Image (cartoon, rainbow, N blue to C red):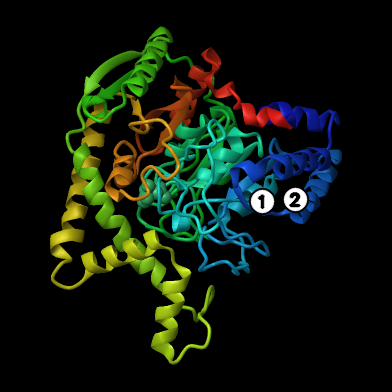
């Protein structure tokens, strides 16, 4: 049952083959049994879940249900959920119970989805391996000695192991796509502004975007139907009307123009990963697509530019955590300055402190022009590269990450090696375009994700392309052995 699609479960709920309360208990039991191996959840919201499930059952009974009504999902622990602990993976927020609900979680709740709990993540979404969480590392269900990717590693591991049907994630520089790739699931990072950021704890506001993570593109489309759309509580939310993400799924791919950026297949790309990606591209050719080699010449500049812009914005966003308004406060402060300093030193982990320092430095007088301004100029070039390429082709394909999931602890002492993992994902956020990761095969028994990038607001197209592939392959239906153990 844990590997059923949303539409199958929705039909079973409507036929009264199962109730939402039963389905919810089933997942809560699986989490209790299996999650000690993974650590994918920070908080299990059992009471909330059972109450929402009972309500969903009444709605279904009354014929007043959407396709998401009664479907159990999980939320990355940076969406504010009223009355439920929201830690952002940090000690700083180990006691933060938001008084309000984020737009994403409230829309999914209004659509009838049931919240099982809050998933583990890198602290303040900073990381590529989920080893930066104050609540402990998350393990990859395909091999418990490897990382699930980050920062939405808890959401990815939980979906892969069948500890939820679907989950929310956020992607500032790859945090939906890279864990989706490492855990063999499907994830979509929407166009910047497509999904409201209201109530999402901010990391880098000009890059952050929330999106769905699930087994299939079709399930992601179900979540997008509820999540996406204008929100007057977020000034960067777009007024462009939503597409219908479900109705385009079955459009044939005949004549689809796929661009393969040569920079995505250069040095540093693992040969096993490259083979899987090229096999996937062949499959698209069988479905009627035409392939063309293109160029995104500024790819290499995405890492230095992102790792100036993201920490700069983070240093500003995280200044609100000062021990005064919410979150951790040190014991017996001597005076105000001592309280600020010790609360922040105690509440933030190492990676977060490092980024605050880098960002504060990059924004300081005299350095601003040399770093932040320059990084913004590079960002503009990267955006232009995509705009040019997407005039020639409909979608761009390549790997999500240069390798499959790496060993726990293998990169924690080498920040540059860790940042290099983000080479194929960062530029998408700098440009603001949408992109997906879909399971495309295995290399050394670990999942490999294919990245599909598209033009602004082309989410429906991406989901269509992904769905057609998934109708003809079954990589997205593979289940890790540990998930079968309950
Ligand atoms: N790995 C990147 C970082 O550490 C991206 C994280 C994200 O997308 N939230 O910043």
Q: Which mark is residue 49?
A: 2
* Left-right relation of 266 to 346: left
Res 12 quadrant in image: top right
Residue drawn where x is 52% and y is 88% of the image? 332
Beta carbon of the mark 1 residue lies under 8 A of ligand 1:
no
Q: CA distance from mark 1 to mark 2?
A: 8 Å
Q: Is residue 480 left or right of residue 31?
A: left
Query: What residue is pinned by disc 1?
Result: 117
Q: Residues within 10 Å of mark 1 (few under 14, many from 20)?
A: many
Q: Residue at x 27, y 50 (%)?
A: 306
Where is residue 120? Give x, y as percent. Answer: 56, 51
* Residue 36: quarter of image: top right
Does residue 65 sit above or below 336 in this rendering?
above
Task: Using the image, determine if residue 413 lies above or below residue 66.
Answer: below
- Label 1 vs 2, first from the N-terminus: 2
Residue 208 vs residue 421, the one in the foreground: 421
Residue 350 visible to an observer of this rendering: yes
Query: Do the CB atoms of the residues marked 1 and 2 lie less than 8 Å apart?
Result: yes
Instruction: Label 2, secondary structure: give it.
Output: helix
Q: Where residue 290 sits: x, y (%)?
A: 32, 13
């Amino acid at each position: 049952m844990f590997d059923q699609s949303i539409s199958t479960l929705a039909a079973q709920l409507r036929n009264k083959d199962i109730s939402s309360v039963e389905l919810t208990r089933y997942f809560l039991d699986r989490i209790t049994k299996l999650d000690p191996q993974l650590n994918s959840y920070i908080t299990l919201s059992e009471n909330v879940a059972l109450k929402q499930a009972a309500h969903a059952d009444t709605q279904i009974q009354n014929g007043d249900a959407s396709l998401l009504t009664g479907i159990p999902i999980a939320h990355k622990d940076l969406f504010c959920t009223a009355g439920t602990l929201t830690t952002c993976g940090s000690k700083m927020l180990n006691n933060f119970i938001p008084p309000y609900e984020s737009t994403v979680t409230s829309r999914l709740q209004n659509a009838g989805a049931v919240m099982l709990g809050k998933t583990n993540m890198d602290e303040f979404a900073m990381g590529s391996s989920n080893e930066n969480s104050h609540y402990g590392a998350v393990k990859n269900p395909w091999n418990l000695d490897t990382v699930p990717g980050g920062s939405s590693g808890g959401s990815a591991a939980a979906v892969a192991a069948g500890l939820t049907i679907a989950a929310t994630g956020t992607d500032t520089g790859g945090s939906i796509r890279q864990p989706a790739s490492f855990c063999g699931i499907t994830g979509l990072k929407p166009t910047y502004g497509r999904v409201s950021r209201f109530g999402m704890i901010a990391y880098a506001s000009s890059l952050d975007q929330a999106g769905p993570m699930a087994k299939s593109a079709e399930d992601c489309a179900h979540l997008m139907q509820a999540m996406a759309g204008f929100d007057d509580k977020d000034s960067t939310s777009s007024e462009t009307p939503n597409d219908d993400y479900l109705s385009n799924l079955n459009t044939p791919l005949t004549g689809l123009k796929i661009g393969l950026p040569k920079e995505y297949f250069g040095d540093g790309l693992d040969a096993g990963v490259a083979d899987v990606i090229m096999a996937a591209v062949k499959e698209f050719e069988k479905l009627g697509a035409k392939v063309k080699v293109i160029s995104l010449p500024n790819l290499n500049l995405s890492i230095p530019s992102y790792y100036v812009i993201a920490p700069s914005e983070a240093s500003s966003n995280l200044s609100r955590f000062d021990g005064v308004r919410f979150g951790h406060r040190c014991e017996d402060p001597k005076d105000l300055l001592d309280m600020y300093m010790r609360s922040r030193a105690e509440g933030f982990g190492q990676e977060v402190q490092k980024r605050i320092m880098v960002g504060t430095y990059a924004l300081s007088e005299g350095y601003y022009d040399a770093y932040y301004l320059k990084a913004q100029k590079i960002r503009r070039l990267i955006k232009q590269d995509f705009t040019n390429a997407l005039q020639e082709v409909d979608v761009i394909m390549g790997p999500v990450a240069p390798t499959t999931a790496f060993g726990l602890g293998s990169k924690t002492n080498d920040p540059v090696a860790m940042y290099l993992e983000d080479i194929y994902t960062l530029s998408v956020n700098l440009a603001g375009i949408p992109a997906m990761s879909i399971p495309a095969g295995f290399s050394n028994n670990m999942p490999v994700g294919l990245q599909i990038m598209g033009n602004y607001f082309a989410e429906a197209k991406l989901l269509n392309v992904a769905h057609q592939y998934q109708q003809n392959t079954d990589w997205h239906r593979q289940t890790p052995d540990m998930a079968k153990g309950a």
